[in-house]
Amino acid sequence: MQIQDLPYPDPGVPDARSGPRFLWWLFRNQLGGQLKSLAWGLLHFAAVSALPFCVGLAVQAVVDRSGDRLALAGVLLVLCGAGSALGDTFLHRTAVTNWITAAARVQQLLARKTAVLGSALTQRVAAGEVVAVSTGDVEKIGWFVEAVSRFTAAAVTVVLVCVALVVYQPALGVVVLVGLPVVALAVLPLLPRATRRADVQREKAGRATELASDTIAGLRVLRGIGGEELFLDRYRSASQEVRHAAVRSARMWSLISAIQVLLPGLLLISVVLHGVSLARDGRIGVGELVTVYSSVMILTYPLRHFEEIAMAYSFSRPSAKRAARVLALERATDTAGSRAAETPTGDLCDPATGLLAPAGRLTAVVCGDPDAAGRLAERLGGHPSHEGTSARLGGVPLDELPLRSARTAVLVQDKDPVLLSGTLRELLDVPASGAVRAEDALAAAQCGDVLAALAQGSVGAEDPMDARITERGRSLSGGQRQRLALARSLVTDPEALVLDEPTSAVDSHTEARIAEGVRRLRQGRTTVVLTSSPLLLDRADRIVFLDDGAVAAVGVHRELLGTDPRYRAVVTRETDEESTARPGGEPAVDGPETVTEETVTEETVTERTGPEKTPPEKTVPGAPVPHEAVPGADVPHRAGPGALTPRKTGPKETVPGAALREEAAHGGVIGDDDVLHRLEEIEETA
């Protein structure tokens, strides 16, 4: 395999039982390249090792006053120089090729495994570890493969030179034959300790990297809680731990390097002393002494590859272990499926809970447990990461379909969707039926202000569709990212669409419009919304309430509010004491404070909260808690059905003047660029 032939048509099935087994599998799959490296390496090292023989021959020819042998020595020196240059050039070429192709193979394996596992990957392995494996670890594994290419040639050369010295001059050759193994293997007892210290350093560096990544990703939240300095102090402490671990590791590797310089020197001194003694006794000639002496000096060059292979293995072993751990992960279901590829139609049901979403209707699902709601959403998409009864679409078990067919039939939008960097046009360029235009999807998701914000931030983009979205949409607020993700899902227009809390980060006014837009755009298509928002629930054709993992009630929103206290408690967030304290214990379904599409307007939101006030923490039963109505205020944020967490809202989803108030409220807080700069300063000083 050459670099120009990448990627591999099939990277193969790796042996992921352990790190060393994975490295051995990788070596076997690089066998052709390794043999090429061995051939060129032998040419290079043999030519280098032959130089002392040529020099010895020339010296002896001068002593014997033989012009013919001197000329022969000169020719041999030229040939050795040419062979050394040619071998070194192609050894480097093949070794680097082995490095790159091995790294590419590992990256292809990781990419294939990531595509197969999907969201199940990050549920089992931290996202930071996946990134570390696919970047730094891949490079270290490739380094080991490249080091093996050089080491094998060096090891064979050392053995051949020792044998040649014994044959050429037994008295000195035996000394070299006994001393070289000691020189080569003396550092082996130190390698385990050096490896452990290197592992500790990489582990601490990985934690520091994850902490930096989390800090950067959470800048918006950190500004809201004033936690920038706290996280910077944590990163500073982690950086110092990395520095101390790196110093301890470097000390051990320095000791190993010192030994590998000291021992060859001692061997060389021993050879010279013994050789001088033999020369005085007339048992060897001057040329023979020069030859053996020069050979020992030259052997220190291939011996350096023994240290390199030890370091490469030390650094690559934990990297290979992490890569093998990721590659060993498997889905709970067979992604190939047992049925032919098809896109079934009909009712969407989940036998595990008894949920039934009729075809062509908007079904809302209310679940008191956010984790159970997330598992249900994943199960409805087919091929979940955990074993269990398969969801069915039109009576067809989704797990029996190929993974691609199941994803085409049912699209699940996660609670925290990810936006990829690029233009808005590229974001919406997804596999779709073609029945829904991008403009209609953006309008239904209420993305008008998002388009304006993107256009303002993209200089030179005349068409808002050409505006660029930053990495993970960090320049946008949580609600804006959520609405863009919803528009992307609507453009896809799948047979069945499952939305998990699609409006948890938007204000009530926008949420009411989104509810109507989704209902209108998905008319005649199967849609399931997992939510506890009364605004969405009031527009659903059918509501299914799940309690303790099973269907507890089915009906419409206003009916369930009056008949099922458990449903009312989840939707209105009222406690048992509040329900008991209300006269008659009945919910105020038709009271003047009940939020409906007609009553939720921009004026009523402002009227309830005031331009500078936070929304009240408690509303009239049956009404939703207005959220994100006021910029910069700590408002209830639905992290899941029935759950409330304080959240800092962004400045772009509110009334005019919000951005100025947000800026004034945080005038003394570190900005994004400042935090990034401080992280760089800490790294440099560490």
Image (tube, helix red, strand yellow):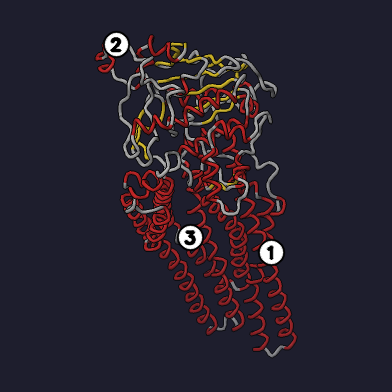
Give the number of the mark in front: 2 or 3: 2
Residue that carries the numbered disc 3 in the rendered image: 185
Position of residue 640 in the picture relative to residue 13 (left or right)? left
Rounded to the nearest angstrom, the CA distance separating label 3 from label 1 is: 28 Å
Distance CA(mark 2)–CA(mark 1): 86 Å
Query: Which SS class for mark 2?
Result: helix
Q: Is residue 604 left or right of residue 420?
A: left
Mark 3 residue crowding within 10 angstroms, few (<14) / some (14–19) / many (20+): few
Sooner in the amino-acid sequence: mark 2 or mark 1: 1
Look at label 3 and name its amino acid: Leu
| Label 3 vs 1, first from the N-terminus | 1
Residue pointed to by mark 2: 585
**Lower sequence index among marks 2 and 3:** 3
Q: Which mark is residue 90?
A: 1
Q: Residues within 10 Å of mark 1 (few under 14, many from 20)?
A: some
The residue nearer to you, when weighing 36 against 375, is 375
The quadrant the C terminus occupies is bottom left
- Tell me where residue 465 appears, x and y as whole percent: 61, 44
Q: Does any portion of residue 199 appear in the rendered image?
A: no
Type of amino acid at the residue the image marks with label 1: Phe
Q: Secondary structure at mark 3?
A: helix
In the foreground, 346 or 633: 633
Q: Secondary structure at mark 1?
A: helix
* Quadrant of the image occupied by residue 630: top left
Mark 2 against mark 1, which lies toward the viewer? Answer: 2
Q: Gap between marks 2 and 3, in whole Å? A: 84 Å
Check whether the beta carbons of the residues at disc 2 and disc 1 lie within 8 A of each other.
Answer: no
Q: Amino acid at mark 2?
A: Gly
Locate residue 284, reporting x and y percent.
58, 80
